[in-house]
Amino acid sequence: MAFPRALLLSALLGSAAVTLAAPVFTPCEVNTKQWGSITYEGIPLSLGEDGSVEVGGVPINFAVATCQTTQTDRYDSQSKGYLVNANDPSKCLTASSLDQSDATFSLQECQFNGAQMAGDVYPEQSFAWDFDSNGKLANAYLNGANSNAVNSTQPPLYTIKAQNDRYSFDGSRGKLLVDYTPSLTSLPTPIQIPQNQLPVTATQPPPALECSSHTSGQIIFNNQTSSANQYKGPINGKWEAQADETTKFVFEECDYSAAGPKNDNNAVYGRIRPATDLQDSKFQCYELTSTNYDWVNGVELDGCGYSTFNFADDPDQPLVVPRWNKISDAIEWVIFQNGTQLDHAYAYTQLDFDTEFGVTQYVWDAHGIGFAFVDADNQNLTKYPPGLVTFNADS
């Protein structure tokens, strides 16, 4: 339901204020070293193709411009101000409307320090947040023209939300929206904003990770070269050998070329995901538990990433990524650094590893498949042929 703007502002400005310590007004200066991504339910905000702010995607770097602060106790404070694009401080997070449902957000010219006084906040760009000085994130709410503090006993007049309750396969929950909800009795879900102080100003966002086609199928492990743990058959969702397993996986082809890996007709790089992500609206990827060279590392589920990196900017940063050879169907985890492939991981069963290979190591999952990067610290592994992991794509 829409409310006339004049009526809305009259109601807001006439409301009673909470009794707190006297607020301190500042000139709304941007703290360019207090920056980072803003998240909604742990998901970073990004900029969509139409200019709308979205939930999910390559994170926008935001900085904070504080216009007013009230210290509520020794450690906690409540503030009001702007959320600024840290890579373009002339642009602020802005609501399209204050008096309707499903209003969108975009980055618009900042209206710092309005006509009234230094520290005046433009309503469509005004946010309120509470901050515990022991933490690194602050819970923030759209404040609009509200003159009241926002706290547990005095909720904001607006509810921020994601357009969709569930993920799309590419990790988006649609646009960041806001409803005018003047009758709230408790705090709604906040966005979380950076409050940590960094030694440098914001770096440019990393390149987006572009992923295209995806293929479903089973992953097969062949460890018949082992003396104690011979097996050939499918694996389950925990990457454990299980002969009667029907678990399906998805290999999603992605463009990591900025970091070094380049796809060709024979082999492609990407990410391995549970096939259930196609129906369950989740955004999960399998990753190695570590790239540590001293032991066999397990495989675990984690949130997928939205970006890669440019090795020219980060020559020391390693990238460990799965590769699917479409000729042999082999799946390998490959490590790149400074744009060059350094090694690939070898697959072994983790059970009885000490006795079979003579290598003392941490066991992530005694029944699971592990991957090792072979070097001088675990050279005993070279005495035994590794297992073979293949992707049996659905026809």
Image (cartoon, rainbow, N blue to C red):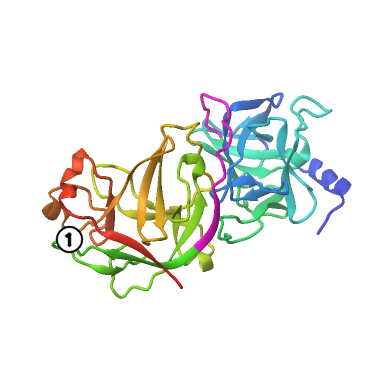
Q: Which residue lies at the image location 63% right of the left edge and 47% below the top edge? A: 153
Residue 87 can be seen, yes or no? yes
Establish if 42 lies above or below 368: above
Q: Which residue lies at the image location 25% right of the left edge and 68% below the top edge? A: 232
Q: Which residue lies at the image location 76% right of the left edge and 56% below the top edge? A: 101
Q: Nearer the viewer, residue 77 or 98?
A: 98
Which of the 4 quarters of the picture holds residue 240? bottom left
Q: Nearer the viewer, residue 98 or 286?
A: 286
Q: Nearer the viewer, residue 395 or 31?
A: 395
Main secondary structure type of the part rendered in magenta: loop
* Amino acid at pointer 1: Ser
In the displayed structure image, the side of residue 151 where residue 275 appears, left or right: left
Q: Element type at marker 1? A: loop
Establish if 9 lies above or below 22: below
Picture coordinates of residue 16 (x, y %)?
Answer: 75, 42
Q: Is residue 263 magenta?
A: no
Q: Is residue 201 magenta?
A: yes
Residue that carries the numbered disc 1 in the rendered image? 226
In the displayed structure image, the side of residue 34 where residue 23 appears, left or right: right
Picture coordinates of residue 303 (x, y %)?
Answer: 47, 52
Quadrant where the N terminus sits is bottom right
Establish if 322 lies above or below 316: below
Picture coordinates of residue 57 (x, y %)?
Answer: 59, 48
Which of the 4 quarters of the picture holds residue 163? bottom right
What is the tally of numbered marks visible in this picture?
A: 1
Span colored in magenta: 195-214
Establish if 103 lies above or below 136: below
Residue 182 can be seen, yes or no? no
